[in-house]
Image (cartoon, rainbow, N blue to C red):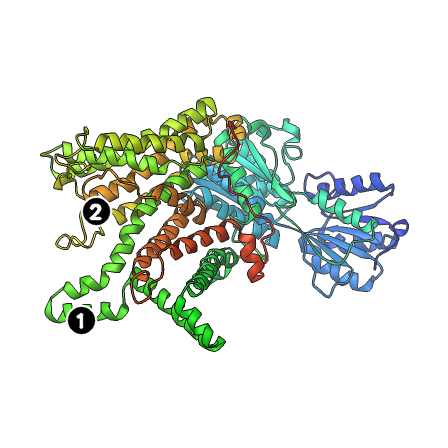
Amino acid sequence: MQKSPHELRVGLVTDVGHVHDGTFNQYAYEGLMRAAEEYGFDPQISETDSLDAYEDNLERVLEEGCNLVITIGSRHGEQVERIAVRHRKVHFVVVDHEPSEKSQNVTGLVFAEDQAAFLAGALAGLITQRDAVGFVSGADVVPVRKFHRGFEHGLAQTNRRAEILDTTTRSFTDVKAGEEAGQDLCANGADVVFAAAGKSGAGAIRAAAQEGAWVIGVDQDQWLTTFEEGTVPGSERLLTSAVKRVDRAVYDAITRAFDGKLGSGVVRYNLSNDGVGLAPYHQADTDVSSEVKGKIKEIADGLRSGEIRTYVGPAGEDLREGLLTRLTDWNWRAALLPFLAVFSALVIGAVFIAAFDPVVWEAFGEGIGAGLSAAWQSVAQAYSALFAGAFGSPAEIVAGLRTYIGTGEPTELIRAIRPLTESIRITTPYIFAGLAVALGFRCGLFNIGAEGQYFVGGLATVFVGYAIQGLPGIIHLPLAIAAGIVGGAIWAGIPGFLKAQTGAHEVITTIMLNYVAYRFADFMLQVGGPMAAPGFRPVSPEIEPSAFLPQFFPNNPSLGVNVGIFLALATAALVYWLLFKTTIGFEIRTVGASPRAARTAGMSVTKNFILAMALSGGLAGLAAVHDILGVIHFMPNAFASGYGFDAIALALLGRSHPIGVVLASFLFGFLEAGAQRMQAPPASVPIDIISIVQALIIIFIAAPEVIRLIYRIRAPEEEREAVFTRGWGQV
């Protein structure tokens, strides 16, 4: 029952300890006093000396007439709820306890300890030199379990080699036991120690710090409390503290009570509302590198947005246990959007197919039923042809397989699987080109010049392929591949350099360089040109067989699928590793997110712009490498592929993530291959329908609110916006 603000009398009952003990007793007291000063009331404060005295202290503040009672400690939550039943006119606020739904006059202030501990564990993983970190626990209560599990998972996020050395004091008040625990962990090799054990934990980190280990505090900023603002020996070894803003939570609860808005139930505090987090680095600030600070900020942002999860349950349980648990914890709503985008595009494509089929219009002249039936047959026939053109006919594949098993004759089987091999062949350069644009996006650069880089990479690889003779394939082939990569990288490095040095926008420079590349290829390959083959065709000489990419079906030239698909998948894995597992990738992504912040952190924006564009161009050059070394074995003058522009769509569809780009490339590859069968009789559907479908997919992916509106999907609480490119001259 809510009281009038003028009738409120506020009391505080601490957990075992006092209001200046450096634990969350002190934080709660500070939040209480801030509210008292603001609202002008005198609080009743009762400090608890022992567990047995807790209930007596509660009764004492009630006898003093307090009708809003702040209590501390998860150990006492159920005890408070029992007392609350007898005092219906009093509202109780319990820190670190989630009350039952039946409690009508109890509010729990619950914190995401796992998120704060996850950050602490991630920091420990980046700092440890011995790959051994220590954890000290106090009593076995839910917050401590959440601290432990979050710390464990955060450590695994940044350093899977590191192990946790666990110890416990079984108490929150035994300082001597804490000191012994900290010393034991250091003796066993731990060089970073994190303690969630109240006063015992304070003793543990103080002792470990004095032994030379790095330490991480808990609950409040222990540089201010345990290390007395840097005056206690070992304060320079305190990295940070995993703080719970109990002061803010208590202040908020009292404010709501005075506003008449404090209800029963649970109020949750996490990173999103700044209820938990890491304290400043204080004296360790210069010892924590800008790279480490940036990585911790990135993880914190990921936890806020939901991109990174702690996988810690409400009782501190490990949600990573078992495949079923992982699947149920998967963000299916986010995974559903791309699927619905493709589905919606196919549905609208079906409308176009039916709308422009003369047979359907004739059928509608006979009646609505006949028209709808004809429309269904037209769409079914078109999409059946699309499927058969992309994957092949299952019946024909089975028949061909039976013939091959029975007679050893592969002709029928090869004919049946040709659509599937063609889909894979088309997909391969899409992967390279999509990765090229996606990597540029990750650095905040819009590489619209992948087409020109494809041309220059093609010229370089074909030249090495035909001009160098007499080399064994084991040398010649890698050399030709490297030439294509270098050619594309140099061509893309030019706009990267101009962007970094002059601020020239990469969209303009890459478009212009596309045309330069086209004309340069025209000059080199025109009849009589420096790279033209003898005769009257504007093409290069055919490359040496030693530079061919190995074919899956070398005796059947109609099947162009080759080992390039494995090279593409390996490249995608390499790009993923580079972006998300290396310092280079971290800097590229940081520059993409905020060049100013990256420069402040000591990163070279100029270097990363040039590097990202060069890497992007090298990937675009690999698309040409596949087509020349694996498919046609020469370079024609009219080499326009369109991959460079389709790659923009692939990067958008794949959300600039290597795995997403691979999946998008397979989708586009299968659509392109299937379209060839769809335009042939009996379907006779224009191939432009597939272009419409692809465009619709991109529209729906780029504007996910359209899909959410159509299918009534609730948007996540917070989404992070990808940085694709910036304004003119902004570096």
The total of numbered circles placed on residues is: 2
For mark 1, what is the residue? 402
Within the image, what quadrant is residue 43 found in?
A: top right
For mark 2, what is the residue? 631
Mark 1 or mark 2: whose residue is earlier in sequence: 1
Amino acid type, label 1: Arg
Amino acid type, label 2: Val
Pick whichever, 185 or 624, lies toward us.
624
Q: Position of residue 266 (x, y in %)?
A: 70, 56
| 310 lies left or right of 643 | right
Q: Position of residue 23 (x, y in %)?
A: 68, 42
Within the image, what quadrant is residue 540 found in?
A: top left
Judged from the image, the secondary structure of the residue bearing numbered disc 1 is helix
Q: Position of residue 475 (x, y in %)?
A: 16, 36
Residue beneath the point at 36% across and 61% down:
685
Whether pointer 1 and pointer 2 mark residues with C-beta atoms closer than 8 Å, the reply is no
Q: Residues within 10 Å of mark 1 (few under 14, many from 20)?
A: some
Judged from the image, the secondary structure of the residue bearing numbered disc 2 is helix
Question: How far apart are labels 1 and 2 at the CA level?
Answer: 29 Å
Residue beneath the point at 13% across and 39% down:
544
Most distant residue in the right direction: 6
Residue 576 in sight here:
no
The N terminus: image quadrant = bottom right
Number of the label disc, if any, that sits on residue 450: none
Residue 24 in sight here:
yes
Pick whichever, 400 or 132, lies toward us.
400
